[in-house]
Every structure is written in structure tokens, then in C-alpha cells.
Amino acid sequence: MLFKSYNNFNERATLWLAQIGSLGLALMMFLTLGDVIGRAFNVPITGAVEVTELIMGLMIYLGVGYTTFLKGHIRVDILISNFSAKTQGILDTITGIIALIITALITWQLFRVALAQIPNQDTTQIWELSLWPFGLVMALASILMSTALILHIFINIRVATGLDNNPPETAKE
């Protein structure tokens, strides 16, 4: 029961963030379109490039949690697919733990940099937007990638120990 509620929470939260990221993609598209049309008439949108860069960073971190939840990252399993379910579970657990460590380090650094930008009053060059809120959103969103990895590690441990021969699918096929 706890696993199912954790799984449902992770899916809802990561999907919600991914949907916000997709709105950022639409905003970035219209901003770039307007800037290109403006340049054709010699009136570009001031600061379009820096806003596009900020939105792009947000899009990546807002969408990566849902991609992880769906097991949507690129995976080459030519060799592994021939192993038994237990062996696959062991290998997936190991790679999941490594991914979790790397993600935790990235999250920690995102928080560190975002919080350092507050007293430094770091801003963008043209519009002078504060950078720390963007960094903080990216750091918070990356936490959900970690929770999705923890979910998959738990599933893989159950498969590796033989408690689960057919793990529940979190990915939408």
C-alpha cells in the first residue's frame, strides 16, 4: 500500500512539473518566433536569448523527473536482456544506486549555487532577472528525479531478491 501511494505521488508530481516544463517550451517557441520576425524588421526582442536560456534550463529539470519515472532514459540492454530476472534486478539496482548518487550530487550543487546567488545578487545581463529563483526551482525539481530513482531501486531490489518476479510497471508503454 505504501509503495502504491509513493508511486502515485511520484507520478502525479513529476507529471505536473513536466506539464509546466511543456508550457515553458511553448513560451520559448513563441518568444523565438517573435524575435526572428522582429529581427526581419530590425526590431528584435531585447533579452530573448537570455530568457530562452533560463526557460531551457527549467524545461530540462522540470521534465527529467517524469522521464525517469517512466524509465524513458536511453538504455542499451543488448547483453543484459539475456540474463535472468534476478541478475537483471541486481545490475539495475547497482546502476540505480550510481545514478542516485550522481543525481544527489547534482541536486546538492544546484542548491549550493542557487543559495550562493542570493547574497551575490546575480542577475541576467539585459533584463537583470535574479538567477537564484531559477536555480532553486531546478534544484527542487531534481529532487523528484531522485525520488523516481529510489522507487526504481526498491523495485529492482525486490526483483533481485526474488520477492517479485514480475515487477509493477511504472512506465506507460
Image (cartoon, rainbow, N blue to C red):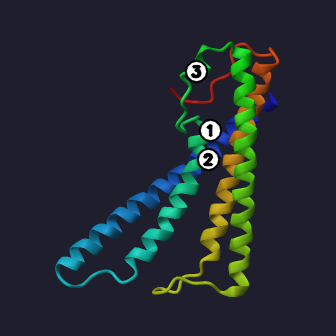
Residue 134, placed above or below residue 91:
below
**Residue 20 at what x, y percent from top left?**
52, 56
Q: Residue at x 72, y 64 (%)?
A: 109
The answer to whether residue 147 shows anywhere in this view is: no
Check disc 3 and give the amino acid type. Leu
Give the spatial CA distance, label 2 vs label 3: 27 Å
Residue 65 is tagged as 2
Q: Where is residue 26 in the image (x, y as percent from the top left)?
A: 39, 59
Residue beneath disc 3: 79
Instruction: Confirm or deny contact between disc 2 and disc 1 (CB under 8 A).
Output: yes
Q: Between 113 and 32, which is closer to the camera in this rendering?
A: 113
Could you tell me how far apart the alpha carbons at marks 1 and 3 are, in whole angstroms?
23 Å
Tell me where residue 86 sits by quadrant: top right
Q: Which element type, helix, strand or loop, lies under badge 2?
A: helix
**Mark 2 neighbour class, 10 Å CA radius: few under 14, some 14 to 19, many 20 or more:** many
Which is more foreground, mark 2 or mark 3?
Answer: 3
Look at the numbered discs 2 and 3 and tell me whether their residues touch, using CB distance below 8 Å.
no
Q: Nearer the viewer, residue 9 or 41?
A: 41
Please give left or right for residue 166 compared with residue 172 in the image: right
Tell me which numbered mark, 1 or 3, is placed earlier along the sequence: 1
Q: Residues within 10 Å of mark 1 (few under 14, many from 20)?
A: many
| Secondary element at tag 3 | loop
Name the residue tied to disc 1. Answer: 69
Q: Which mark is residue 120?
A: none
